[in-house]
Image: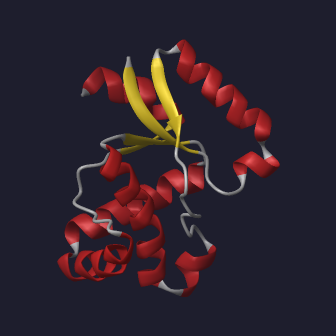
Amino acid sequence: MTDYFVYVACTTPVRLPAYEAATMAILKHLGVNAHHMKNVNCCGAQYIESLNRNAFAAMSGRILAVAERFGKDIIAVCGACSGSLKHVKHMLDTEPELKAEVNDILAEEDLEYTGKVQVMHILEIELYRIYT
C-alpha cells in the first residue's frame, strides 16, 4: 500500500462533499493509503495568483512544505489546486530567489520547501504508480 496526502482544498469539502467521498473510496479501492492533510490553507489558485505572484507561491509552497515534513506526496482532488501546486513546485524548483523568499516565510512555522514532494491529480494516480 502506498501512503499519500490527499489535498481536498478549501472548496471541495463545502461544495462537493460527494466528490470528496467518491475520491476517498476510489483511492481505497486502488490500494492507496490516503491521509487528509490537516492544518493546510487554500492554494491561492486564481484569486491570489492574479493579485500577487509571491503570495501565491508562499500559499502553495506552504502546502508542499507540510507534505514534505511528513514525507508524503500529494494527491489533489481539485483540478485548479492540482495545477496551482504543480505550477508553484515548478516555480520554486527553477527560481532560487523565489524559493529563498518563500522559505523565509515558511521558516516562521519551522517549515521548508526542498523540492522532494510530488503532486498529482486524482486522475493521474494509476499512471504515476505505473511509471515511477
For image coordinates 29% across by 81% down, the residue present is 104
| Residue located at (79% from left, 51% from top) | 14
- Residue 86's place in the image compared with 18, above or below, is below
Q: Residue furthest bottom?
A: 51
What quarter of the picture does the N terminus occupy?
top left
Residue at 30% x, 48% y: name it.
117
Front-lying residue, 60 or 121: 60
Q: Nearer the viewer, residue 54 or 66?
A: 66
Q: Is residue 58 above or below residue 8?
A: below
Q: Residue 42, how many percent across, how many down?
A: 59, 64
On screen, 11 above or below 128?
below
Question: Considering the image in quadrants, where does the C terminus appear?
Answer: top left
In the rendering, at what x and y percent does residue 39 appear? 55, 57
Q: Which residue shows up at 60% across the image and 71% down it?
A: 46
92 relative position to 85: left or right: left
From the viewer's perspective, tell me whether residue 28 is left or right of residue 64: right
